[in-house]
Amino acid sequence: MSIETKYRNKLTKEERLSKKQWIEALYESGTSIKSPAIVLVKHEVNVDIPFPAQAMFTVSKRNFKRAHDRNRVKRLMKEAYRKQKHLLYATLDSQQKKSTLMFIFTGKGIPNYPYVHGKISDLLSRYVHQLSNTESLPS
C-alpha cells in the first residue's frame, strides 16, 4: 500500500494540531526552519497519534488586520501543505517518528498560491532532509 493511499489527500481533523499542551510544548521546545514569509516550527513527540504529523497554521493579526485576509492566507497554506504532506509522511513513517508542526506566515502582503506552494515545499523538503540526516548518524 503506497503512502498516498494509506493517507488520503485530505487534511482531516486528526491531522490538525489542537491540543493545548502540545501547542505549548511546540512553543517552548520546538525548533524552527525559516524561509522568507513562512516559518516552520517543529517538535517531535512520543505519543500515539493516528497520523505521522499534526499541523497548525497561524497568521499575525499585526500584519493582517482583517480576519478575511488572515483566513485567506491560512487557506492557501493549508492547501499547499495538504498537497505535499505525503513527502513528510513517508519519511516520518519510515523512521517511526511523530511530529507536531506550526506554519507561521510572517509576510506583509497577501501572497498568491504558487508563492505559498513553493515556500511550503521548500520548508518540508528541508525538514525531510534534516530527518534523513539524523537517521544516517551513528547512535
Image (tube, rainbow, N blue to C red):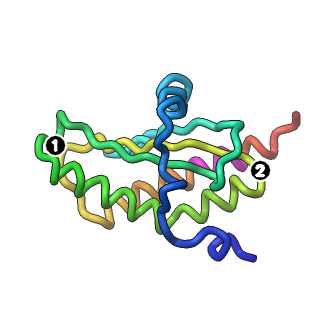
Tell me which corner region of the image, top left, top right, bottom left or bottom right, holds residue 135.
Answer: top right
The verdict on residue 131 being magenta is yes
Q: Amino acid at mark 1?
A: Phe
Residue 76 % position (x, y): 31, 60
Q: Which residue: 49% across, 61% down?
A: 12
Q: Which residue: 16% across, 43% down?
A: 64
The verdict on residue 66 being magenta is no
Disc 1 target residue: 64
Tell me which corner region of the image, top left, top right, bottom left or bottom right, holds residue 119.
Answer: bottom left
Q: Amino acid at mark 2?
A: Gln
- Say which of 98 and 136 sits in front: 98
Q: Which mark is residue 96?
A: 2
Instruction: Please state the extent of the stretch shown in magenta in the rendering.
Output: 127-132
Secondary-structure class at tag 1: loop
Q: Which residue: 69% across, 53% down?
A: 92
Determine contact: label 1, label 2, CB under 8 Å: no
Report how many numbered discs are placed on residues in the image.
2
Crowd tier of the residue under label 1, counting other residues whose Cα lies within 10 Å: few below 14, some 14–19, many 20 or above = some
Q: Is residue 83 left or right of residue 111?
A: right
